[in-house]
Image (spheres, rainbow, N blue to C red):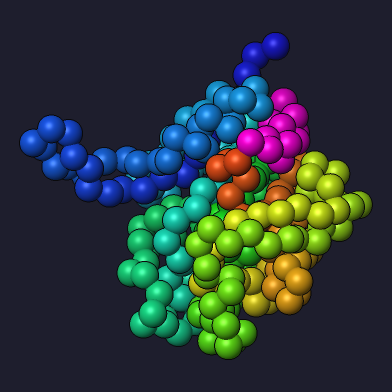
Amino acid sequence: MSRPLIGITAYFEAARWSDWVREAVLSPPSYAKAVARAGGAPVVLPPIGPHAIDDYVRGLRGVVLAGGVELAAAAYNGEQDARVHEPQEHRDRFELALARAAIRADVPILAIARGMHVLNVAQGGTLIPWLPEVLDSDRHAEPGVPHTIQVSVSTKLGKAVGDLVEVTAPHHQSVRRLGSGLLAVAWAEDQIVEGIELQGHRFGVGVQWHPERGDDNRLFDAFIEAAR
């Protein structure tokens, strides 16, 4: 059986080779490895602008909207918080357009961390720009501190990972208003949304955590199965 071609979004960042420092297309290898373990053929997508997006969507069998820096608040008509990392607006524009094109074409989407926010904003949703201020706590931003997520078992996400999953998912932003056609399907103990699904789509799942970083590949397995 041939492996479905899976696009993974990436950064433009400075990188070093010996004494050379040049802008490069960068993607953590954990995404490609998780796709490959599940039976997909990973391809890294540079955020080069919207002109190639229709060709990407026609050629790909699935899209991973990968993690990274927070979206610019302008993407959802919000006010930029000075505490948020400098946004990469070229990447925002590319990924929002890619998400919308994949939704229109019913191409499976797995949206991870920042990618979940992209999926939500692509459908007209909004974000909490600085979650610690809303909660009066940094508990969602603490690196390396696991917490338990409750998942709706009747959903694609629940069928893949079960009703309870322990994750490590430091983040400063979160879903505020859900976008059109999206449902919340996973929550932290304080009811912050940690998983969303696009209704009526073959596979449109977003999670706040990073399933590519651990040994549990079940979510990628379900994603690649939908892409076949």
Q: Residue furthest top?
A: 1
Front position in the image: 139 or 183: 139
The image quarter containing residue 59 is top right
Residue at image coords 58%, 50%: 210
29 relative to 11, above or below: above
> Going by the image, does 17 lie left or right of 147?
left
Front position in the image: 135 or 67: 135
Percent x, y of residue 118 = 55, 60
Magenta span dominant secondary structure? helix
- Looking at the rendering, the stretch of residues picked out in magenta corresponds to 215-228
> Going by the image, does 173 lie left or right of 108?
left
Residue at image coords 65%, 77%: 176
148 relative to 25, above or below: below
Residue at image coords 32%, 40%: 25
The answer to whether residue 60 shows anywhere in this view is no
Percent x, y of residue 86 = 33, 69
121 relative to 199, above or below: below
Front position in the image: 161 or 13: 161
